[in-house]
Every structure is written in structure tokens, then in C-alpha cells.
Image (cartoon, grey):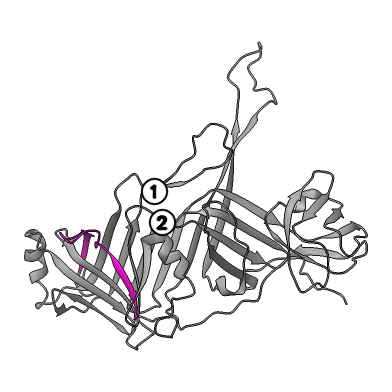
Amino acid sequence: MAVFIPERSFGWNRKSWVQKESTYGTPVMPVTAGSFPALEMEITPATERLTRDDTTGIRSFENNRFSGRKSADWRVMKYLIPSGTTNVAPDDGDFFQAAMGDVSLQGQTVQYTPDDDDVPGLSIWKHVGHFVQGAYGCAVNQMVLSFQGSDFSTVEFSGPGKDFVQGGTTTIDVTANKGVATIIVADADFYSANIMLKVHDHTTGYQISSVSSNGTIVLSTTLFHTVTAGHTLSPFAPTVTVVGDALHGITGSFVTNSTTVTIISATVTLNNNLQLRDDEYGQSTPTAIILDRRREVTFTLELYLTRANFYIFGEAARFLAQNITLTAGDTVAKKCQVLMPQGEMDVPGITDPGAEGEVMLSATGSALSTSAGANDLTINFI
């Protein structure tokens, strides 16, 4: 049976998975349960190329550069999508836990709260037609929740990763018999270790253990069937299943100190200010996520400046603590709630519309913790 693999890749064909790592930096292969829909997804590989500074009498750099540490940057933007079922985390729940640190079930609410000591690492996967990209040992350094009155609510996660992998589509160079774990391809540059490989029409993926420059690929398990030379090798893509509905800005509310305020838009940004430990001797990739700096939570608001809400100026000038609850959605099991019990607004600015248009108020602020502890930000799916 012929296996169709496209020659080109298109955005609509993107499939995405995220897997929480039990040990930081140990890749976890993609599975159906980890799939999620994305609006945008970027994995940017990085390998240091180091130049020697000693001299040999010429002004040019000689061709003797050294490959240093590997790492990756990554970014995922997606709609804010509850699972649609009480007690069940959203498809992107691993991202929320990696951003916040802790997840728990509070009655029928899935709740994400800050952890000062530990956040999990992630393995992130992107499959687009004929290729796959992956990054593992990924940390969520920033999370941005965006709420718009005339659009869907979104969330963007981004941060650094320990290492990257990739795989393309080519053919087997030498027939591989059933029961062997070695495949020969014409060009080893198509693959790296720690990806899942689809061998011809086999329905099960095979994890690559190692790749040699001579085109030898060693699999973690033996082949279930003989595959003759010329058949296709391509990245394995588990089935994608997603649940839940995106939340539009026509449903939701913004409440501050028990007063409901009509807003145009809002953002909430978590900056973990984390670091990857990447300076240890004998290590070619980062080895741990380090939480050695303060976490920051900030927010922005935009609203029409009505007579009734002019009081915001006075409260902001007094730095009055705002108990802020921002809710997206209005149906049980289809709501996301952002809690900031100690929101402190900066003095707002007024946007002059010119000769036409309505005057708007733009405000920024910071979410702080109360005396109860690390509670500057809580996210509930209710």
C-alpha cells in the first residue's frame, strides 16, 4: 500500500502535542492524549558556534570554530479552551502547570496556583506534513492571557528549552528485516535521535535511539514487519483529538472589589524570570530549571471612560488593592477564571480620540501576593 507524504508543508496541516516530563530533560514521545490545537507554534533551535581568539598571523578567522551548547526557544499561541467537562483539565493543562507550578482539584474546579520551588519541564512536538520538530526540557518563562471584547480569548506560552530534535521524510536504502532494530537510509541528516518514526505503512511508531553519519538508524524496538528498500520513512504523528470550545469576548466579566466593570480588553502576563542551568562543566545542554529570581504578574486594561468609572483614577492614585476576578465564558465547565486578589493599578492614562471617537482609559498594574503567601495569580477552569 502506498503511503502519501506531501512534498510541501502548510500551516493548516500542523499537529501539536505537549507532554509533561517526569525527569527534566528526558524526552517524552508524543501521544494522542497530549494533542492540542494551536494558532501559532514556533520552535527555534540554537547551537553555539565559538570562535578561537588566538592568532596565526592573518586577519581572517580560520575554519576551526567549535560547537558549544545546544538549546532551543519556543512559543505557542492558542485559543483559551476549557475542556467542557467539570473536573477535567484543558488540553493544554500541562502548559498551565508548567507556567504556574501546581495543579489541584478544588471541588469541580481545576485550579492552577504558583509554586515557588518547582515547575515541570515539557516535551513539545510540532508535525507539519513531511517533517516534525520537537524540543524537550522546555520551561514556561512567560504566559500571556489576552481577553478582547470583539474576539476570542487567547493564551501564549513561551520560554527556553534544553535541546531540539527534528525529522523529515526519505526512503530506506537497504531492506530491513522483521525483528531487526537497524535501518539504513541514504542521508542521515534527515533525522536525529529521540523522535518517533513511521516505517512505511506500519501503524505503530518507532522511537529513534541513535543516528550515525553513515545513515544507520537504531530504533528502540525491533521492526514488526520486513520493509524493503525504497519504502518511505517519515515522522510518526499520533492521532489528534481535542476537546472544548474557544471562548469569545461576548461572554465573560471583569470584577474589581465586588464591582463589575465593563472593559474593552485586558491582558494578564506572568513572567517567571526563570533560568536554565547552562554553565556546568562537561555538559553540552542545560541541566535544570532554576527559579532564582522573583516571579512577576502584571496586567493591562482598556475601557471607555464613563462618568461612573472615573473613580478608578482616585483608587489608583491611592494604590488601593484591587481584588480582581477576570472571567472568560459564562457556562459551567466552559469558563476560565483569573484571580488576582491584590491587584495594584498604576495611575491610568486617558486616550484622546481627536475630533471623533470616545475617550478611553488605559491602565496597567501589578498583581501582588497577600499575607497568605504565593497567591498573586490563580487560574481556575470551572
Give the residues drawn in magenta, as a range. 361-382
Q: Residue furthest bottom?
A: 331
Depth check: 314 or 135 in front?
135
- Are the residues at dot 1 and dot 2 in contact (C-beta closer than 8 Å)? yes
Question: Which residue appears at 55% of the width and 51% of the height?
Answer: 25
Q: Position of residue 180 (x, y in %)?
A: 86, 59
Q: Is 362 positioned to the left or the right of 221 in the image?
A: left
**Crowd band around label 2 with a 10 angstrom C-alpha radius: few (<14), some (14–19), many (20+):** many
Question: Which residue appears at 77% of the width and 61% of the height?
Answer: 221
Q: Secondary structure at mark 1?
A: loop
Quarter of the image where one finds residue 100: bottom left
- Is residue 277 at all visible to an observer of this figure? yes
Q: Which residue is mark 2?
A: 119
Q: Which mark is residue 216?
A: none
Q: Looking at the picture, which amino acid does disc 1 mark?
A: Leu
Depth check: 66 or 192 in front?
192
Q: Is 354 positioned to the left or the right of 11 in the image?
A: left
Q: Is residue 295 above or below residue 266?
A: above
Q: Position of residue 273 (x, y in %)?
A: 36, 49
Depth check: 66 or 308 in front?
66
Q: Which residue is mark 1?
A: 274
Q: Secondary structure at mark 2?
A: loop
